[in-house]
Amino acid sequence: MQCQGPDCTTEIEQAPGGHRQRAYCSDRCRMAASRQRAYRVEQARLKAEVEAKEQRERQELRNRYPMLAEESIDLLYNLKKQYQYGGLHLVSVIGAALVRENERPGERALLAADLFVQGQKKSYPAVTDNKTGRTLIWGNLADWFAFCNKSDVPTLRQALALLQGNPNVTGPARSGATHVTIG
Ligand SMILES: [Zn+2]
């Protein structure tokens, strides 16, 4: 019989008589096998823990958005995981948009997500259309959040264009808000 130690190929001579069969050639192999078993048990435990956490978080999303299809729950879960900072806000923005769009991840939801991520990258600046002088978004997270939640597709497109393309986009920030010039 071959030694049962990890990576050991030593053939074990069994003592004659009614002795219990030896599984290991040495104490070293016996302990190595024991460590390997403990490691595997620990890995299995960690894997189960991660899976349980994922199930819990998905269930929380299902409870919060009971009207959403499983693929939308997948989208929300992955967004939450992907964006460590601002992920929860993003989930709220997209979640609300998905609910409004009758369970379909449509154009509005994706635009809102895109705009919110762009805003996040630029620390939520104020966005003003200099042609009209109209401020679409004031420079703070709460306004970004509200804007992405409530705006329709044309308004979201306008904000995205201003944020990405126009070097003159800037706006007066409300008192206490961070003022950021884009360009
Ligand atoms: Zn051995």
Image: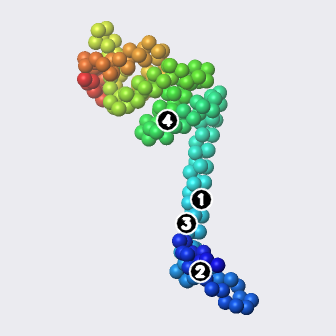
Q: Neighbour class for label 2 at 10 Å: few (<14), some, many (≥20)?
A: few
What SS does tag 3 mark? helix
Q: Nearer the viewer, residue 34 or 45?
A: 34
Q: Which mark is residue 39?
A: 3
Looking at the image, is mark 1 or mark 4 earlier in the sequence? Answer: 1
Looking at the image, do the residues carrying marks 3 and 2 touch, with CB atoms under 8 Å apart? Answer: no
Task: Report, in whole angstroms, how far the alpha carbon at label 3 lies from the one at label 4.
Answer: 32 Å
- Image quarter (top left, top right, bottom left or bottom right) of the C terminus: top left
Q: Which residue is mark 2?
A: 11
Q: Is residue 89 left or right of residue 159?
A: right
Q: Which mark is residue 79?
A: 4
Image x and y of residue 172, in percent: 28, 20
Where residue 140 sits, quadrant-wise, is top left
Image x and y of residue 87, in percent: 46, 36
Task: Report, in whole angstroms, how far the alpha carbon at label 3 lies from the one at label 2.
Answer: 25 Å
Looking at the image, is mark 3 or mark 2 earlier in the sequence? Answer: 2
Image x and y of residue 182, in percent: 27, 24
Three-letter amino acid code at the position of disc 3: Tyr
Three-letter amino acid code at the position of disc 4: Leu
Three-letter amino acid code at the position of disc 1: Ala
Whether residue 177 is visible, yes or no, is no
